[in-house]
Amino acid sequence: MAEIKVAISSGSKDVGKLTKVATYPPPVINDNQILFKAVAFASNPTDWKHVVAGWGTPGSIAGSDASGIVVKVGKDVKGFAVGDYVSSALHGNYRKDRGAFAEYVIADPIFTIKYDKNTFSEQALPVGSNPAGRITNFEGAAAITLGVATIGLSFSNSLKIAKDKSKNELDYILIWGGATATGIIGIQIAKLVYGLKVITTASSKNHKFLKSLGADEVFDYKDSEVVDQIVKAANGNIKYALDTVSSKQTFQQNYDATKGSTKVAFDSLLFLSSNDLNRDPQRKEDTFATTRVYLASGESYNREGQSIVPSKELLDNFKHFWEELIPPYLGQIITPGLRVLAPGLESASEALELLRQDKVSGEKVVFRI
């Protein structure tokens, strides 16, 4: 294999210059990895945040979501074969040899989904906005994998939601940011896999869509009374709360909206903790976690000089979710609307910039190779 084209983290924070296209040596997999030829990619908020916040390394391959066709399988990998249609989540913008935005992608089986070719179309979606729908193409496949992995680790490990759906029938989960790509996936998994009642927030234009996905109650986060409205609707029955936006403001709102509920498990996706909250001193039984999805691959990573290592419990919980709980429901998952950019790795920077400038709601930005 000759050198491959990749989109790398540029190290620049300038508008439109978060990534740049380069050529890298051909990828080499180990016995526990998969190599696939990329067809489509999706951007995620973590991609631009890694660049702007300096979490990653300039020159590392960008991107966290890709789909394509398997060309090589490590000898110790089970369940995958050359020619399979797959999508995978990766810790992009972090290491030079690993990332999604590349002609050929090194993938871990524990973060990879295989699709039925008989229900899949190879035809590219047109550039522009495309409606939400089931996963029937490479763009849709690229759009969901990191979201499914993130929600899987959050629900199975951080929030520790009961695996038995019958035990969750009366319990609510509050998902702040229902129209984010992760929120859209979270609503569906909460309902389909765990049988929870779902309360979520979104702008009014997205309410009908989120209810079609299974949300029981949707409230406008722009309404000054939104917290009180949620407290009244939940009537003390919120058991889990996930903040997919994960700013200090939304984390506080998510907490305040659980007033009257007891023993609530909280999760955020951006290194927020109970120390970032103005807490009610009477609520001593609440628990707090932050989901670091990349740990589920089994690899440790460094943040601000600290090595973060996955526990055996974390790995076991995620493995059970990925291999046992979610597979029967993947065919029912609805993607966000897909905003398709022009093909080519040159579109990677635009994809990240749209998210950085908060120009995406209820959609996932995708593009082909």
Image (cartoon, rainbow, N blue to C red):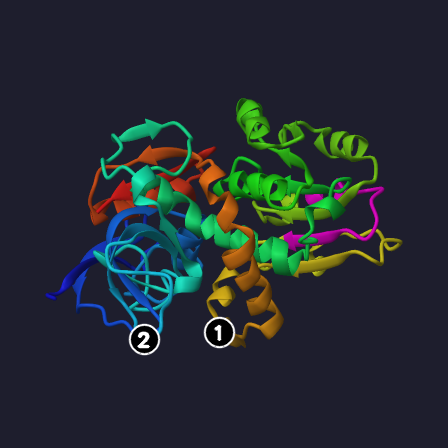
- Residue kind at label 2, given as amino acid type: Asp
Q: Residues within 10 Å of mark 2 (few under 14, many from 20)?
A: few
Marks 1/2: CA distance? 19 Å
Residue furthest toward the right?
282
In screen coordinates, is 107 left or right of 185? left
Q: Residue at x 45, y 38 (%)?
A: 358
- Residue under label 1, please give it: 300
Tell me the tag on residue 171: none
Among the two numbered marks 1 and 2 on one chain, the one whose residue lies closer to the N terminus = 2
Magenta-span inclusion, residue 257:
yes
Residue at position x 71%, y 58% in the image: 288
Name the one closer to the observer, 346 or 25: 25
Three-letter code, disc 1: Ser
In the drawing, does residue 287 fall left or right of residue 203?
right
Q: Horizontal and vertical percent for residue 198?
A: 67, 37
Compared with 225, 54 (above or below) is below
- Determine if residue 360 is in view: no
Of the 4 image quadrants, the one containing the N terminus is: bottom left
Q: State how many labels appear.
A: 2
| Residue 99 appearing in the image | yes
- Magenta stretch: give its range: 252-267
Callout 2: SS: loop
Rendered location of residue 191, percent (x, y):
62, 39
Q: Residues within 10 Å of mark 1 (few under 14, many from 20)?
A: some
Magenta stretch encompasses residue 263: yes
Task: Report which residue position mark 2 lands on.
Answer: 31
